[in-house]
Image: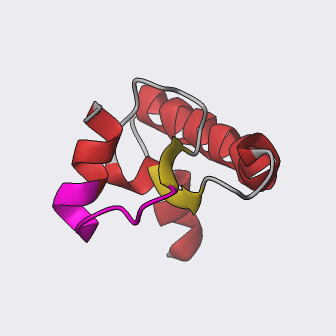
Amino acid sequence: MNDRRKAWSEKHGPIPKGWVVHNMNGDMADNRIENLAAVPRKTGNISEVVAPYRKRIRQLELELQKEKENGYSSRTERSN
């Protein structure tokens, strides 16, 4: 069992037969549970399933990285 399948199973239980666990942001080394999605293998092209999310995920990750580098959270400032 690979690392992402193990992480998914530990959080959500057994992966149904015929399903795969996909890294939503495309980074195969990023096995945080919030980055993993279990999808049926027979969905056609899995990349097409996650494509709408991948761009947004990368954009949000870059924003968070910039916020950390600046030492503040603009999200927190906007909510105040």
Place of residue 46 in the rendered image (x, y in percent of width and height, measured from the top left): 72, 46
Q: Looking at this rendering, what residue extends furthest in the left direction? A: 10
Residue at (79% x, 45% y) in the render: 45
Q: Which residues are magenta?
A: 9-18
Nearest to the observer: residue 56 or residue 76: 56
- Indicate whether 27 appears above or below 11: above
Place of residue 10 in the rendered image (x, y in percent of width and height, measured from the top left): 17, 58
Nearest to the observer: residue 40 or residue 37: 40
Place of residue 24 in the rendered image (x, y in percent of width and height, measured from the top left): 58, 45
Residue at (45% x, 26% y) in the render: 69
Magenta segment: does it hold 23? Answer: no
Q: Looking at this rendering, what residue extends furthest in the front direction? A: 17
Residue at (40% x, 66% y) in the render: 16
Is 1 displayed left or right of 35 in the figure?
A: left
Nearest to the observer: residue 53 or residue 76: 53
Which quarter shows the N terminus? top left
Magenta segment: does it hold 14? Answer: yes
Which SS type dominates the magenta stretch?
loop
Place of residue 27 in the rendered image (x, y in percent of width and height, measured from the top left): 53, 27
Residue at (79% x, 46% y) in the render: 51
Rendered image quadrant of residue 9: bottom left
How many numbered marks does the figure carry? Answer: 0
Q: How has the structure been colored for display?
A: secondary structure
Rendered image quadrant of residue 49: bottom right
Nearest to the observer: residue 49 or residue 73: 49
